[in-house]
Image (cartoon, helix red, strand yellow):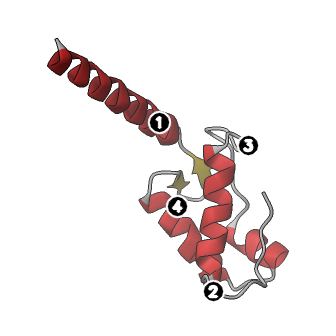
Amino acid sequence: MELNLSEPGQSRYLRVYEYYKELIVSGQMKPGAKLPSIRKCSLQLQLSRTTVETAYMLLAADGYIISRPQSGFYVTDAVLAAANREVLGILLGHFAQSLLLI
């Protein structure tokens, strides 16, 4: 996945959010992987630290990453748990439908 910041329409912090979210969900960033620091990411992407921090805070609020004080931001395994819950919900839905057919 490529991060395109020049396209009009979506806020830059949302683009950064979607970029990292896709890397995490696709498995390209594994649980426990460390994200670049806010400062380093802002320098690499040539964005303000506030923009990157907002994206990271949104990722943390949605459970994709966790902040460890004095250490940085890390990918959580909550994504795997969420995926498992979604699959379980689908299976339970199919099971309930099969019961109705009996």
In the rendered image, which residue does mark 3 sit on? Answer: 28
Distance from the alpha carbon under mark 4 to that under mark 3:
16 Å
In the rendered image, which residue does mark 2 sit on? Answer: 9
Q: Nearer the viewer, mark 1 or mark 4?
A: 1
Distance from the alpha carbon under mark 2 to that under mark 3:
26 Å
Q: Residue at x 67, y 70 (%)?
A: 38
In-front residue for pair 65/2: 2
Disc with the residue nearer the chain's start (4 vs 3): 3
- Residue 44 in percent (x, y) is at 83, 73
In the rendered image, which residue does mark 4 sit on? Answer: 59
Q: Are marks 3 and 1 in contact (CB under 8 Å)?
A: no
Disc with the residue nearer the chain's start (2 vs 3): 2
Disc 4: CA contacts within 10 A as few (<14), some (14-19) or many (>=20): many
Q: Are marks 2 and 3 in contact (CB under 8 Å)?
A: no
Q: Residue at x 42, y 61 (%)?
A: 61
Disc with the residue nearer the chain's start (4 vs 2): 2
Distance from the alpha carbon under mark 1 to that under mark 4:
16 Å
Q: Nearer the viewer, mark 2 or mark 3?
A: 2
Q: Secondary structure at mark 1?
A: helix
- Residue 30 in percent (x, y) is at 67, 38
Q: Are marks 4 and 2 in contact (CB under 8 Å)?
A: no
Q: Secondary structure at mark 4?
A: helix
In the rendered image, which residue does mark 1 sit on? Answer: 83
Disc with the residue nearer the chain's start (1 vs 2): 2
Q: Amino acid at mark 4?
A: Leu
Disc with the residue nearer the chain's start (1 vs 4): 4
- Residue 72 in percent (x, y) is at 62, 57
Q: Secondary structure at mark 3?
A: loop
Whether residue 10 is visible here, answered yes or no, is yes
Distance from the alpha carbon under mark 1 to that under mark 2:
29 Å
Q: Amino acid at mark 3?
A: Gln
